[in-house]
Amino acid sequence: MKLSKIIEKCKLEKVVYEGDCEIKAGYCGDLMSDVMAHAEPDSIWITIQAHKNSIAVALVKDIKAIVFTNDITIEGDVIKKAREENINLLRTKENSFNICGEIYCMMEGKTDTD
Amino acid sequence: MKSSYSREKLTLVNELIYEIKIKEAMTKNVIFFDENVTFREIQLKLKEKKISGVPILDKKKNIVGIVSIDDIITAFDKNYIDDKITNYFTREVVTAPQNFSVVYAIRKFEKYRVGRIPVTESLNTRKIVGIITMSDILNRLLIEVQSIAEKVKDEEAKDGKISNRILEKVSKKRLRFEVKADDFNNAGRVASITKKYFQNLGVSKEIIRRIAIVCYEAEMNICLHSLGGHITVEVDNNNAVVCAYDRGPGISNIELALTPGYTTASEKIRALGFGAGMGLPNIQHCADKFEIKSSLKTGTLLKAIINLGEKNETK
């Protein structure tokens, strides 16, 4: 599914948007090594860990976009690093549970009336 | 075919600036002066030899300063061209040791914007053994690339396995990274640089990912749980070998440490999303061979070997 479509439907805020791409999977996790072990390449990652190490993890795993939840503040150095490394950063006021539900349903083709 | 050949040459330059040492590129016959000389005398020498600056050395050939064309112009302007340089010359000089790679000199050129860098015998001495400019570096690079291109042309004529030759040439370079304890901000840079290194070698994406995970987890372990250490990455016999060393405190029970979910991370570290207890298990899972040794006296040594797969990968 195209990242632009996910951003539009879920009303995600574009903090760093380097361009559209194909998202093949999603992962939700706040522990770095857990994401290291289980996230798939070309995926979207939902987390509250809005710091530079999340960018490092995304780089290693070829994660295409990170969604920071709970309207967390994102520091300037994180944004700068994401731009340098071409990682899309998105933000939402929703919590991880809700936004995961929305994105999951979109990607699996389900609606909330199912 | 042609475009991938030039791409290989371009990344080769990248590798070569790490491989070529300053002493191989520098000029050894240094034109220099001692302190008891006038600006006029230096000006005449600069003109005669068509150079832009000279180091000022003492009797033992230790560097005490430097005079460049800029200084000569100022001397003309302020009317002290016939004075001895003693009270005017620059005493803070940018130098580089002869055993370092030219990439070190290139960074200094970029940072300090000087025209030439006197070369010292070693890191902690001031004795000058040569002088280096960007043209010296470029000349040397051209020689190296030309000789490789010639070898490649011969190989091409022989059996058509190009990448093999280049792989062997660059595999001698070993990467080494110092990792400081608690350096969260820089954590992840080992994985990032190593990833680019193997991309240059044409290794498959899936294998690079595994190497990157090993580097990341090893770096985080040194950063989060040790007093500091270093990581080396090198290519040996078509394998990537990642070694991580730290200075302590050592692991008291290795089997426990290898258990998924087991962690000794503090609250502060866990608040950042670390301490999942998956670092070592992740490394074990990604590596083809894995060894870990630790002592409470000397620290921990970890070695992970990842096979690079088929050579001459097409992308």
Image (cartoon, coloured by chain):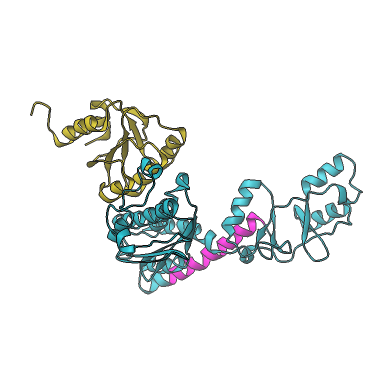
Chain colours: A yellow, B cyan
Relative to A85, say whether A67 is above or below.
above
Q: Is residue B98 left or right of residue A65?
A: right
Determine the residue positioned at 40% across, 54% down.
Answer: B221
Residue B207 seen in the current view: no
Relative to A7, say whether B27 is above or below.
below
Q: Percent position (x, y) of residue A77?
A: 46, 36
The part of the chain drawn in magenta is B133-154
Residue A30 seen in the current view: yes
| Prevailing secondary structure of the magenta residues | helix
* Location of residue A42 (image quadrant): top left
* Location of residue A113 (image quadrant): top left
Q: Percent position (x, y) of residue A88?
A: 35, 36
Q: Where is the N terminus of chain A found, in terms of image quarters? A: top left
On whether residue B78 falls in the magenta region, the answer is no
Q: Is residue B98 left or right of residue B246?
A: right
Determine the residue positioned at 30% across, 25% down.
Answer: A93
* Location of residue A17 (image quadrant): top left
Q: Where is the C terminus of chain A found, in terms of image quarters? A: top left
Residue most toward the left?
A114
Q: Nearer the viewer, residue B37 or A89?
A: A89
Q: Nearer the viewer, residue B206 or A111?
A: A111
